[in-house]
Image (cartoon, rainbow, N blue to C red):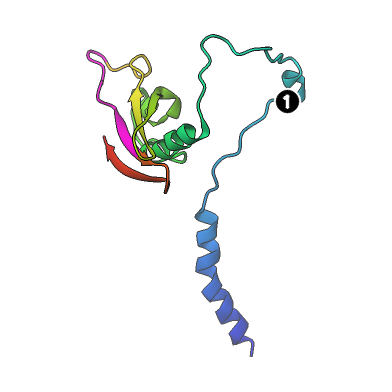
């Protein structure tokens, strides 16, 4: 009789350990209340404000998750100068709507971000065609 529960635990052990490997996307970090109290929101947006509709933002996010997933780390031994390629804030984005619910997204490395002398890498990035009806990647080019 004692062997049955022990066997069940051994069967559940791989499931339980694999659940520990699943990572949830990080939650935003908030500043302490003292720091937040010092923030004054402007009454109007500045001239350089960018307006994105939800569909375009979701399409950009889908392309970004494919191009550089939130949990991707630089491989062990990556030279310090190459770490910037694994940081999302090293990239700029351009998006525009096409026909029939398609949003095109371009992801490109800001030249000043990663210092690679003597010549900068200009071909780092990707282009995507995102189907906003089914929220899937129709095509991608790297």
The residue drawn where x is 22% and y is 15% is 119
The residue drawn where x is 46% and y is 41% is 71
- Residue at numbered disc 1: 32
Q: Is residue 75 visible?
A: no
Q: How many marks?
A: 1
**Image position of 32 with respect to 45: above or below:** below
Q: Is residue 62 visible?
A: yes
Residue 86 at x, y percent in the picture: 39, 31
Magenta-highlighted residues: 117-129
Task: Kindly state the secondary structure of the residue where label 1 is placed.
Answer: loop
Neighbor class of circle 1 (other Cα within 10 Å; few <14, some 14-19, many 20+) is few
Q: Is residue 70 magenta?
A: no
Q: Quadrant of residue 104?
A: top left
**Image position of 37 with respect to 22: above or below:** above
Q: Quadrant of residue 96?
A: top left
The residue drawn where x is 72% and y is 21% is 36
Which secondary structure class fits the magenta region best?
loop
């Amino acid at each position: 009789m004692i062997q049955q529960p022990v066997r069940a635990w051994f069967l559940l052990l791989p499931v339980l350990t694999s659940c520990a490997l699943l990572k949830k996307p990080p939650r935003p970090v908030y500043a302490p209340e003292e720091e937040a109290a010092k923030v004054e929101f402007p009454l109007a947006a500045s001239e350089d404000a960018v307006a994105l509709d939800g569909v375009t933002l979701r399409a950009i996010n889908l392309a970004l998750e494919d191009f550089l997933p939130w949990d991707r780390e630089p491989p062990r031994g990556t030279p310090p100068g190459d770490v910037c390629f694994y940081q999302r804030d090293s990239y700029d984005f351009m998006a525009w709507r096409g026909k029939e619910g398609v949003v095109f997204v371009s992801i490109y490395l800001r030249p000043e971000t990663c210092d690679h002398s003597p010549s900068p890498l200009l071909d780092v990035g990707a282009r995507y065609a995102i189907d906003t009806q089914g929220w899937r990647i129709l095509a991608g080019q790297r």
